[in-house]
Image (spheres, rainbow, N blue to C red):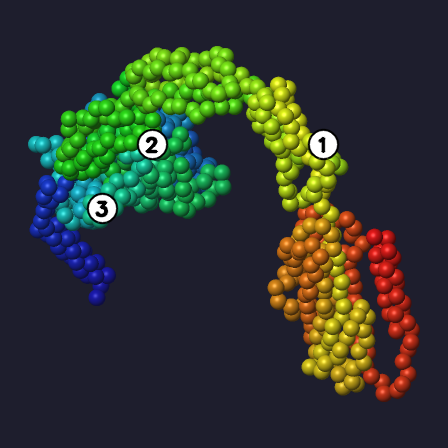
Amino acid sequence: MSKRIILCIMAIVTILFVVLINKTYASSDCKNISEEDIKYVNATLTKINREEYNANQRGMHWTDYYEMPMSKRYEIDKKSMLMASTEGMNIGGIQNGYIGLNEYWNSTGVLQGLVKNKLVNDNLYVIDKYTNKDTFFPKTNTNPQIYSEVLSNWKFPFIKEKNGYYSFNSDKYHIYKDYNTKTIKMHEGERFGFYPFNNCKDNTEEMMKRNLGFTVRLDIPFIMTKDGKVKNAENNQYEDMVFEFSGDDDVWVFVDDRLVLDLGGAHARLKGNINFAKNEVYYESVYNESTGQDEKDVYKKAFEDGILSQGKHTLKIFYMERAAGESNLFVSFNLQSGGVKANYIDKDTGELLDSVSQSGPVGENVKTEAKNITNYTLVEKPKKEEFILTDEMQEVNYYYSKNSKVNVKYVDEVTNKEIAKEETISGKYGDKYVTNQKEIDNYEFTKVQGNKEGTMKGENITVIYYYKHKSKITVNYIDKDTNEMIDTKEDTVYEGDTYTSEERKYEDYILIEKPQNETVKIKREDITLNYYYRKLKFNLQIEMNLEKALINGNYYGLNGKIGKIETEIRDANKNSSLQIYYKIKVTNNEERIGSGYITFTIPKGYHMISPDWEVNGNEAKYKVEDLNIGESREYEVILEKNEGIDIAGNIEAHVKIDSEKIPETTLEDNEDMNKLIVMPRTGKIVISLLPIIGALLIVAIIIYIKIKKNNQK
């Protein structure tokens, strides 16, 4: 079969396929969705003549532009944000983030910072780096050569979900323009993307039939609640207020004209969302200009000055199809435009004390209610407390009067202490009050501070009646050695009375001296009585003795500081097991209860198998809790030889006791040691006396030191 015949067959097949596809589109239904399932928002859609727009930005006709060499195009294009894949954009990267001539951008993340972070005259403008002469989002068609069509103040549809969300998904629905009603109508079924300037039955599967190069602006009013949460209509649970977007290319979302979600750049489909309850923005992928890499799953703060204030706000979406390839759009949000705001107002001053905004779908029933406000009393409720939500914010006012109190105090003029029970007169703003002086036994009235009578002004008023006293007595409890004050007691007394002081008991002290007279006759002058104390002594003593040993399960009795074991020849090897038992005795031999920590130093080649000890490296610790005066406690420590260690040798163990925070009278009895000699039995009665003599000498020295200490005490 000739090549010409093959080409003819392929051409016929292609034509039939195209006809079939077109027939499929022509026969497909463009089924409207019920208006009951639709929520409309204000929209402006603009179809842009890409070449004319770019020519205007460059300041030259496109034919002149394409006659220039590539390097010149690059220098021109990098100065403006342009439409479609221009030469300069392809050279410098299709996101208008130029990195140099003939260097392509491998980033797939969004490019942030292309536009100003605040709207100017309710419109979006690119940053000053780019010399754009026009806006991508005109409100009217001021230049028909650039803007093929501007649909200003149209209605754009969102599907009403049962749970209270609203969504548009170009993977499920497509739209067409109804010029009679200036409404974008929604149809079921996807059309391979989002192409608002195509007709319903256009075959947008073919790229050449897609109407690309357009922008869409959507204005969504909503009510922000106090905590950023709204009720899910299906489960009646409160959920975070969320706006979600997925699509390409550039998308910028402003709240009250401030940029919040920045998905700039000519990118493929990417996700982003705003969580109003968490004050958080999420990005699926963001290009980092400092590293030249994409960052995945980026979280940022939505509003730098804190969570958005409750009440009415507007979210504005600016969407661009700029790269001239494909377009898709997914928007989902549970922001509600119907709302009621309850204001709680100070009736006397007009001050707004609090407010609560409730939001929900239009048509929903909402009820407001009074709330408890600290230090205020409700004085007037609104006539209407139940509402049907509309697109407008409805407001009601609850009025309160601030609670007032007059506190009447009766005070000793010298000590400034109250000498009679304080009285309280309660009322609210504007009420009259009257206070009176009291007759108090053994006191004389001197003056009054504050207005004895008057009108409550919404804040607490204090009236103080002062009296003079007779005299004061002070009892001090003093550390004799340091002269520091342990405690003190003051009493107001009257002339002629008899006052008896008393000693106090303190955990760390013992009374050593009382005042000469504990019972005194009160006169006019102030009196001071002193009790002197001494700190109780505290000392912990520790002793450790060998108790026994087990070699391969065989028992060897031990007693004292030093011990010796002769093993059988068959046991004198590295594979034999050895367990050594120590008895540790801790004694409190002074005047007060206390606690301490035992530290046992584990000999090299051994490990401790005693429970309840805290082992760290070659040290084991054990806490002795609340040892009473004269009390002794004993503890058993078991050491076990590590595998592969020779059984023969000198095993020297050390132990010490440290008190917990309390100073001791001496530290000389806070340490002790044991020494165990293990050697194989030779079968001969030849024993070197040198180790035994050395060991006995150590014991003798220890016994001598302890006897000397006891004699000194």
Three-letter amino acid code of the residue under disc 2: Leu
Please say if the residues under marks 1 and 2 sit with CB atoms less than 8 Å apart: no
Q: Which residue is mark 3?
A: 236
Dot label at residue 308: 2
**Helix, strand or loop status at disc 2:** loop
Instruction: Report x, y in % for residue 59.
Output: 33, 24
User: Could you tell me which residue is drawn at 39 percent across and 32 percent down?
Assistant: 306
Q: Disc 3, disc 2: CB below 8 Å?
A: no
Name the residue: 81% across, 73% down.
563
Task: Tell me residue 242's x, y (percent).
Answer: 29, 41
Residue underneath mark 1: 516
Q: Quadrant of the N terminus?
A: bottom left
| Camera-side mark, 1 or 3 | 1
Left or right of residue 413: residue 207: left
Counting residues from the start of the chain, the first of labels 1 and 2 encountered is 2
Disc 1 crowd rating (10 Å Cα; few below 14, some 14-19, many 20+) is few
- Whether residue 616 is visible, yes or no, is no
Tag 1 secondary structure:
loop
Q: Quadrant of residue 398?
A: top left
| Of residues 434 and 235, the one drawn nearer to the viewer in this rendering | 434
Crowding around mark 2 (Cα neighbors within 10 Å: few <14, some 14 to 19, many 20+) is some
Measure how far apart labels 3 and 2 are at the Cα level: 23 Å
Mark 3: few/some/many CA within 10 Å (<14, 14-19, 20+): few
Which amino acid is tagged 3? Asn
- Considering only order in the chain, which callout, 3 or 1, is on the residue closer to the N terminus? 3
